[in-house]
Amino acid sequence: MQAEIDAVDYSVPPQELEVRIARRTLARVYVRGSGVEVGAGTRPWPLPLGTSCFYGDVLDTEGLARYFSATGSAYEGFIDAQTFAGIPDQAYDFSLSAHVLEHLVNPLGAIEAALRVVRPGGIVMFAIPDKRHTWDNPRPVTPLKHLISDYVTGGEDTRIDGCLEHIRYLHPQWAPPIPEEQHQEEAIRLANAKFDTHYHTWTSDTFIEMIEWVEENLGGSILHKELVFNENIAVLRKNV
């Protein structure tokens, strides 16, 4: 899809406006050519004029309309953000995602996959919520050693743990608490259904720790890192 406009809607609340302007500015600085964005939903990354982007998701148009309770999501075809399966190596100049990695059981593996599908010198840019400024605030921070373990194993062995955190810390924010004696059974049920929740959490400090590990181990050099309101944004360049 050809990028037609990189304008920002100034009618949104000030904190949301701050995020959108930051994303647009970073895209203007770093994004060129053709790329891919996964999980854009109703808020695709504002892109510079003259770029093109393929928008992929694990949900189809109808599924996205139900998920966001609104139509108009950016969607052109299926892409699994965890693996980018089916996309050739070095197919794009850039890869984007915002508030996607926290939904995956293996975030480091997903970053590695995003680096795989961009060309040498290409850009991988992503935003992850900072738990201190979202409904994830009551939850413990995911340590780097947990993320590395998920990278090594694929992450499925800790999916139940993520569901347990959802039951203990997130579910009571919206519904009556589940009795503690039922937590394990309910977590297993949710994990088997591959329940959509945040499986990991970050603060700005642990986010930086993670992307520094990526720089040392996965072949992406850090060009930019920033906390903007409730999200941490990183820009990586694939090493040549």
Image (tube, rainbow, N blue to C red):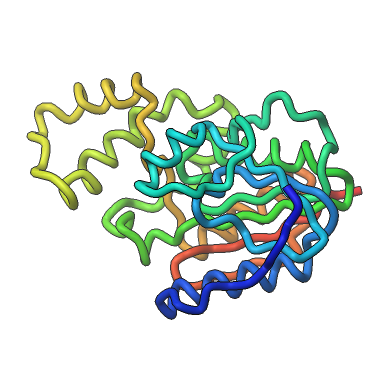
Residue 2 x %, y %: 76, 52
Determine the residue positioned at 76% across, 47% down.
Answer: 35
Residue 37 x %, y %: 65, 47
Residue toward you, 209 or 126 = 126
Q: Based on the displayed image, in which of its 4 quarters is residue 78 positioned? A: top right
Taking 175 as reference, is 191 left or right? right
Residue toward you, 81 or 144 = 81
The image shows a total of numbered marks equal to 0
Taking 1 as reference, is 172 left or right? left
Q: Based on the displayed image, in which of its 4 quarters is residue 193 positioned? A: top left
Residue toward you, 22 or 145 = 22
Determine the residue positioned at 70% across, 69% down.
Answer: 26
Q: Based on the displayed image, in which of its 4 quarters is residue 177 positioned? A: top left
Say if 19 sits above or below 124 in the image: below
Determine the residue positioned at 68% across, 55% down.
Answer: 125
Taking 85 as reference, is 197 left or right? left
